[in-house]
Amino acid sequence: MGLDIYAGPLTRYYSHNWKTVVQQWAEENGYTFNRITPDGEPADNEEELSPAEIQAAVEDWRDQILAAISQPNQPPYTPWPEDNERPYYTDKPDWDAFGAMLLVAACHTYEEPVPLTVEKDWDFGEHPLIARLASDEERVWSLLRGATWWLPLTDSFLFQGPLPTDDQTMIA
């Protein structure tokens, strides 16, 4: 399974009003591109809600999450804007690059030299410095703790929670 990154409004994401970096490249170079869902079905077979319905559902989800993580006697979180038009960012680094990024972070954290290269298809989770950083109770980095979603907030937190689709994931 590939590593895909999307950063932008959830309304736009769930409305499918964005293109992966691979899809953009294919269109720019005259190739056909078909997105397949994790269950192996073509993405165009998905049941569609209108962008307005999606935005309402995402805003409801956002407001519930913000209420759940708000602290007593603290000002409430300001909701981030949601719509189907704001800019987004997408890319597709490979897992080796992701592991190398974690290794660089671990090396800098523990003041160790950064290796010049890593092996293709290496098991980066087994590297002693990455494993050390992942279990370091003084440094709770969401990338090393399984987060796959990040909310646009300045506070630091990590919790298991529902997505707008009711799937569960680690949110930071």
Image: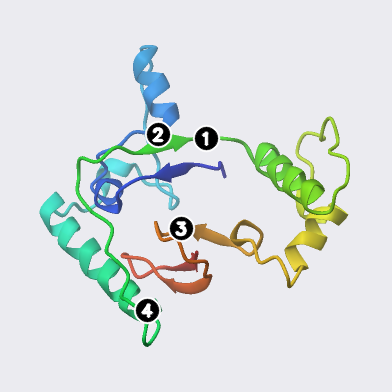
Pick the front one: 30 or 85: 85
Pick the front one: 121 or 42: 121
The Cα–Cα distance between marks 3 and 4, rounded to whole angstroms, is 16 Å
Q: Which residue is mark 2?
A: 20
The Cα–Cα distance between marks 4 and 2, rounded to whole angstroms, is 33 Å
The Cα–Cα distance between marks 3 and 1, rounded to whole angstroms, is 17 Å
Of badges 3 and 4, the one in the foreground is: 4
Q: Earlier in the sequence, mark 3 or mark 1?
A: 1
Query: Residue 145: image x %, image y %?
Result: 64, 64
Q: Give the left or right position of residue 24, taking residue 124 as reference.
A: left
Question: Mark 4: few, some, or many residues within 10 Å (few <14, many ≥20)?
Answer: few
Q: Earlier in the sequence, mark 4 or mark 2?
A: 2
SS state under label 3: loop
Q: Which residue is mark 1?
A: 92
Q: Are marks 2 and 1 in contact (CB under 8 Å)?
A: yes
- Residue 123 shows in this picture: no
Query: Residue 148: image x %, image y %?
Result: 51, 57
Residue occupying the point 30% across, 75% down: 76
